[in-house]
Image (cartoon, rainbow, N blue to C red):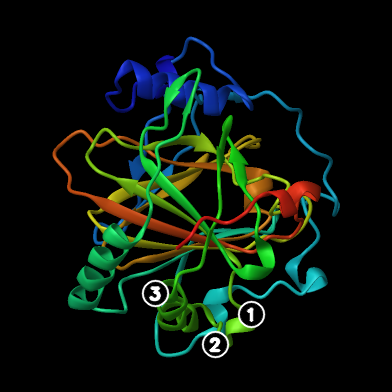
Amino acid sequence: MKHFAQSRTTLADAIAQLKAARARCVIPEEVPAKRQKTDEPESTETVTKETERAWKHEEPPPPKLAGTDWEEPRTKTNLQLMGENVTGVEWRYFIKDESRRSFAGHLSNPFGKTTCASWFAKIRVGTKWTQPSTRWGPMPRKTAWMVAPSSVCAYEYGGMTVQPTPYPAWMIELMKEVMPYCGLKELNEMPDSCNLNLYEDKTQMVGWHADDEDLFQGKFQDCRIISLSLGATRQFELELNWPEEGESLGASQQLADGDLCTMEGMTQKHYMHRVPEEEGPVGQRINLTWRWIAKLPRASERNKPQAA
């Protein structure tokens, strides 16, 4: 439980975090790793320096597949980063781990505040938010799961199941505005699913986890995830599962209104990520996380979508 002392939690939230982490981690009685700023004071990025971490991955490290490198180089798998496919804007990769073929990119709001405020209002009222519960208590945020007609299936994670809703018309229009900034211009190449989260105050969060469910096959092949943040600024943190001696544990990025963030390559295999609670007052935030479904479950035909 001390692993989560980095931010104040209610009992229900702490239990939810512990459940999410326990599937992968053993938590010893040690002080959590501190995050330190980089040498660039104007940057919203921070780096987790090498130190004694507060949790250890339960699974043993996977074998290295390319000599001293964990994964084959992206030139061999033809992985092109989304930020490299766009001109006219400046993507910055705050994690560029070539050895693990793992990458996390950030693009500051290219849309403008007025547009983002309009999107926030439309999504806030146009989404059927749910707050699933398990025996460990309610999810410490509200959520929704939307899918393209070709990819209708429920989303199961953290002991919860979220039923699908078909992409509403506003989602298609939103993707047409957002995806070109990720190098995706045609509708048929855009993501076929979106996980939406609503954080209503500073206590709402998501604990350490990886988006490594079978749906996305992120443990076995390159996996792209695109995130749009709307509303209040929140901290996004990533840490290595199996850091080697002398390595930084990870990094974090402030995600502000209208910011885009990606996780690409094998990030879901080698890193965990979270959005922690905040210490001071913070407003509402909506996060849309688009993914591509790589493996539909066999029973997907039994999961009927809800009306939009």
Q: Position of residue 217 (x, y in %)?
A: 74, 52
The reply, left or right, for residue 178 in relation to residue 75 is: left
70 with respect to 46 (left or right): right
Classify 10 Å Cα crowding around label 1: few (below 14), some (14-19), many (20 and above).
few
Q: CA distance from mark 1 to mark 3?
A: 18 Å
Q: Position of residue 126 (x, y in %)?
A: 33, 62
Which mark is first along the chain, 2 or 3?
A: 3
Cα gap from disc 2 to disc 1, whole angstroms: 8 Å
In depth, the one of 44 and 166 nearer the eye is 166
- Crowd rating for badge 3 (residues with CA inside 10 Å; few <14, some 14–19, many 20+): few
Residue for badge 2: 185
Q: Residue at x 18, y 76 (%)?
A: 114
Question: Can residue 34 be seen in the rendering of this structure?
Answer: yes
Residue shown at the point (43%, 76%) measured from the top left: 169
Q: Is residue 110 above or below residue 97?
A: below
Residue 271 in the image: above or below residue 122 = above
Q: Is residue 230 visible?
A: no
Which one is in front in this view, the residue at disc 1 or the one at disc 3?
3
Closer to the camera in the image, 255 or 75:
255
Across and down, in percent, residue 290 comes to: 52, 63
Label disc, if present, on residue 189 of the rendered structure: 1
Disc 3 marks a residue whose amino acid type is: Trp
- Label 2 CA crowd tier, 10 Å (few <14, some 14–19, many 20+): some
Provide the residue designation for mark 3.
170
Q: Are marks 2 and 1 in contact (CB under 8 Å)?
A: yes
- The residue type indicated by label 1 comes to Glu
Picture coordinates of residue 224, whole percent (x, y):
62, 63
